[in-house]
Image: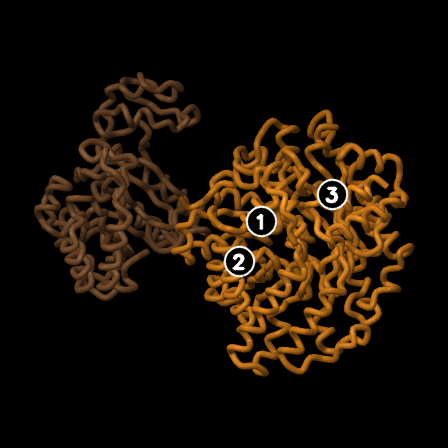
Chain colours: A orange, B brown
Amino acid sequence: MNGVIEILSNTKLDYKQKRAALSSLTENSLPYVDISDKARKYMEDGIICNLNEGNAPYRPRYILPDYKKYFENGSEYLNIKKPSDMYEAVNALLIIYNYVPSITGYPVYLGNVDELLEPYCDTVSEKELENLLKMFLVNIDRNLPDAFVHMNIGPRDTRVGRLILKLEENLKDAVPNLSLKCSKDTPDDFIKLAIKTSLEIGKPYFINHDELVKVLGENYGIASCYNALKIGGGSFTLVRVNLKEAAKLSKDYNDFIERVLPDVIGCQCEIINERARFIVETAKFFGTSFLSREGLIDISNFTSMAGIFGLYECVEILSGMKMGADESADEMAENITKRAYELVKEKEGLYCYGYGGKIGFHAQSGIDSDIDVSAGVRIKTGCEPEIFNQIRLEGKLQKYFDTGVSDIYIFDRTAKSNIDGVLTIIKGAFKSGIREMTINTSDSQLIRITGYLVKRCDIEKYEKGEPLREGTVALGADSIKNCRILDRKVRGI
Amino acid sequence: MAYINKIILNTFIDGPGSRMAVFMQGCNLRCLYCHNPETWNLCTNCGECVKACKKGALYFKDGRVKYNKDLCVKCDVCIKVCHNNSTPKYTDMSAQDIFKTAYDNRDFLDGITLSGGECTLQYEFILELFKLIKENTKLTTFIDTNGYMEFDVLKKLIDVTDGFMFDLKALNRENHIKLTGYDNEKIIKNLEYVSKMGLLYEVRTVLVEGYNDSVEEIEKISKYIFNLNDYTKFKLIPFRPLGVKGKLSNMKQFDEEKFEYLYDNSKRILQSRLKE
C-alpha cells in the first residue's frame, strides 16, 4: 500500500499522471510474463530492459491506426460518420485520438495529417483553414500532453503541410512531435520551410522517405520518438539491450560477438515474444479493440521491436578506441550492429506478421535513468567528430535499423540565415544512408532530449517542483542531468 | 604548395549554401581592427612560441618550428607571444590536398571559399585548386578578399571564380589609410570590375568607432553599393575586440545602439540587399 500512498501524495504529479501511475502499480501486482530464469537475470542486471512497459501488457506499445480508412468509413463504435468538410474532419481526428491505446496512454501516432486533411481544404476559407488547424494543434498539445504524440506530414507539398509548419513555428509547443517525409519529389521549397521551422523549434524530423519505402513500403508512419512502423499496425513491445553492460560480460571482442551477444539477444527475443503472446492471447487485445473490429488496425501489420543502445561505450570497452575518432572503432561499431541485426533476424517473431514473421530492429534512444551510456548507435554527446564524418558513420549504421533510428545535429544560429546550406547537408546525409535525422540550434527554446522535445522553461518549472501537464518534462529534466543532453557539439560556427 | 592557416569544413557565413572555408596565411594590409593578425606573416622560426608552449606541442627540427596537433590544447599562447604576427600552426598544403578534402565532402557542400589573411597573395595556388574543383565537381568557388591585388591577377582569378566577397574598410580614402595603412584606389577599381562582371556576391564593412562609423560614411557606402549594381549584398559587422592586437586591442565592442542606428540607416537605402 505504500506505493499507492506515495503516488497519491506526490505533489509533482497531476491527476491524470497519478491515475496512470496507479494503473501501472496494479498491472505490476501481477507476476512478469513467463520468461526463463536466464532472461530474468539479464533484466535484473540491467543488460536487458523493457522500458517500464509493465509486467502484464494489455495493449501494444505503439499503435498506428489507419486514419485514412477511418475517414473513408467513419466509425460505428465512435458514432462518427465519414467527414464531409474540414470541421468534421478535424473533429473526427480529435475524437479518435482519445481512443488510441499505447504504452503512455496517449496516441503515439496522429496520422499523415496533411494528406488526411488536404481534400477538405476547399470546404473552408483560407482564414478558417488556418484557424481550424491552429485550434487542432493547440487542442493536441493541451489534451494529449505527451511529447511522444507524433504527427507526420509529407512527402507531398500541401497547403495543410505548409500551414502546420508555419503554425508550429509560432506556437512553439513541444507537442506534437513532428516528422516530414522527404522524397526525391518533395520540392526543395517545402523542405526549406521545414528547415526554417526546425532551426526555431527543433522539429520536424527529416525522414528519408525513399529509403524507408524500400524497407516498409509506402504505407508506413513515424510514431512516438522516431519509430518507423506500418500504418494499420504497430509494435507490441520494445525491449532493449544495453550493449555497454553486455560488453562488460565479455572476455574480448570475439567472446562478445560469438558468445555474449547471441545469448543476450536470444533472451531479448524470448522476452519480446512472451510479451506479444500475452497481449494477443491473454489480454486478447485484438478481440476487444474497436480499432481491430473496424479494420483500423490489423494484426497482419504488427511487429515487435528489439532495441540496442550504448554502442559507443560497447566499442570503447571492447577495443579501447572511440567511435568517430578511429576508423577501426567505426568498423567494429558496424560489425557489432550488423551482428546484432542478424541475430535478431534469425529468431522467429511471434505474431510479427507485418515484418514477415521477424522482429524489427531498433536503435533505442535512451531513457531518463540511463547514466553514462549513449543513445542507440549515436556517438557520445560532446565527443562527436566533424559533422560530415559523423553523418557518414551514422549513415553506415542506420541502414541496419528497420523500425527506427535517428541522430541529432545542432547548428550554430548562423544556419538560420543560410537555409540552402542546411538543405545541402540534409540531402548529403540522405545520400550517405541517413534514414531519420533532426536538427536544431543551440539557443532553441525547445530541446530535443532523445527522440522527443521539451521546453527549456518547463524544465525550470519542473526543477522548482511545479506540477506540469506533460509527464515527458520529468523524463527530459532527468535525461539532461544524466545523459549530458546539452553538451552536443554545435556545428557551422 | 600554399600556406594554409586553417580549414573549416562546415560554414554557413562564408558565401552561399554549405561551404568549406580555407583560410590562407599572409596578408598585405595591416588593418587596426584585424581579429586574426596571426595570419599576416610567415613564421621566422624565432622560437618564442616553442619556449612558451607548456604542452610540448611545438619543437624545433632542422632549424624550423614544428607543430604537433595531437599535443595542442588550443590555448593559443603561441599566438599571443608571437611578435611577428604569425602562428606556428599553419601548414604547407598542395592544391591536390585541399581538392581531395573538398571532393571527399562534396555531397554535403555547395562550394568552397578561400579566405585569409589575404588569399589572393597565393593566387597561383587558387588558380590550380579552383581549376581542379571546376573540372571534377559541381561545387562553386568563392574568394573572400580585401581586394588589394594587381588587376591582371584579378582577371586571371575571375576565370575560375563564381563569386567574390570584398572587405571594404572605408570608402573615404583618408579613413582607409588610417585603418589599413594603404590607399583604397586599387581596391575600389577591382571591386567595380568584379561588380561589372556580375561576380560581386557580397561587400562587408567592419564598423570601428572613430574611424569609419560616421553616419555619412555608412550612408555613402550604402548608396555606393546600391548604385553599383542590383544584386550585391552588403553586411555591416560591429567591431569585436576578440583576437585584436596593438592599438585597438583595448577598444570596447561596438556600441549596440549605434550599430542598430547605422544598420537601420543602411537598411533604408539597401532594403533586402542589406544582410542581417
Q: Which mark is residue A458?
A: 1
Question: Where does the image place residue A398, in percent across and percent down from the top left?
Answer: 62, 48
Give the foreground label among 3 and 1. 1
Where is residue B78 drawn, in percent x and y? Answer: 31, 24
Marks 2/1: CA–CA distance: 12 Å
Using residue A118 as the reference point, say whether residue A48 is left or right of it.
right
Which residue matches tag 2? A172
Identify the residue at image location x=66%, y=41%: A368
Going by the numbered disc 1, the residue's amino acid type is: Asp
Judging by the rendered image, the residue that carries numbered circle 3 is A240
Q: Chain for mark 1?
A: A
- Above or below for A248 versus B30: above
Specify whether residue B52 is in view. Answer: yes
Which chain letter matches label 2?
A
Q: In the displayed structure, would residue A107 be above or below residue A361?
A: below
The reply to whether label 3 and label 2 mark residues of one chain is yes
| Nearest to viewer (mark 2 / mark 1) | 1
User: In the picture, which quadrant includes the N terminus of chain A?
Assistant: top right
Q: Position of residue B266 (x, y in %)?
A: 23, 59
Give the residue type at disc 2.
Answer: Lys
Who is closer to the viewer here, A412 or B202?
A: A412
Give the Cα separation between the discs numbered 3 and 1. 29 Å
Dot 2 falls on a residue whose secondary structure is loop
Question: Looking at the image, is mark 3 or mark 1 earlier in the sequence?
Answer: 3
Q: Using the rendered image, report if marks 3 and 1 lie on a common chain.
A: yes
